[in-house]
Image (tube, rainbow, N blue to C red):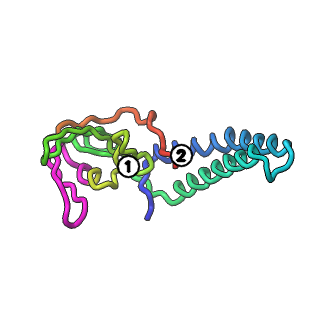
Amino acid sequence: MYDELTAGDIRKMQEEIEYRKLVVRPQALEEVKTARAHGDLSENFEYHAAKKVKNQNESRIRYLEKMIKTARVISDSSADDEVGINNTVTVEFMDDGSVETYRIVTTVRGNSLENLISNESPLGKALLGKKEGQKAHVKVNENVGYDVRILKLEKTVNEDEDKIRSF
């Protein structure tokens, strides 16, 4: 399965790759070199820690490059009155009347702790394309689901403050 990414997601990933290659990689290599000069590598904690940081950086670069290579580019535009990617939506949960505000994002930006929900999550799928005032049924699985009503829809003007989630 391919990840669905917007052109903005890909641009941010490319910026992170460039930063990691031009800034983090040379720093990590220098730290390994410095730690190696301290002597016996078998008991040299700084050397092992520096190697770990270097390897994590290289893994992140490979991960981002693979994500970009295998991504399916999707549009983040939607009609002015419809929920789309990068829009903020205030919903009421019909079963208990609670109200929450979420922003619909792609999977690489999803972070439920910050109320950033993926367009591929059950709630994200249910909200996409809906309009303010409409109800949506969120299907969790074959037997479980719940209803929400869209109370407010806000279009995002600038998505540049978003960060790609790091693993």
Label 2 – label 1 distance at C-alpha: 17 Å
Residue 69 screen position, x and y as percent: 54, 58
* Between 157 and 61, the one nearer to me in the picture: 61
Q: Earlier in the sequence, mark 2 or mark 1?
A: 2
**Callout 2: 10 Å neighbours few (<14), some, many (20+)?**
many
Q: Residue at x 51, y 46 (%)?
A: 166
Label 1, secondary structure: give it: loop
From which residue to which does the magenta span run?
126-150
143 falls in the magenta region: yes
Label disc, if present, on residue 13 of the rendered structure: 2
Q: For mark 1, what is the residue?
A: 75
Quarter of the figure that contains the N terminus: bottom left
* Between 80 and 1, the one nearer to me in the picture: 1
Residue 89: quarter of image: top left
Residue furthest out toward the front = 43
Label 2, secondary structure: give it: helix
Q: Amino acid at mark 1?
A: Ser
**Callout 1: 10 Å neighbours few (<14), some, many (20+)?**
few
Q: Residue at x 61, y 51 (%)?
A: 61
Q: Is residue 134 visible?
A: no
Residue 120 screen position, x and y as percent: 34, 55
Residue 72 screen position, x and y as percent: 44, 57
Is 155 above or below relative to 51?
Answer: above
123 falls in the magenta region: no
Q: Amino acid at mark 2?
A: Met
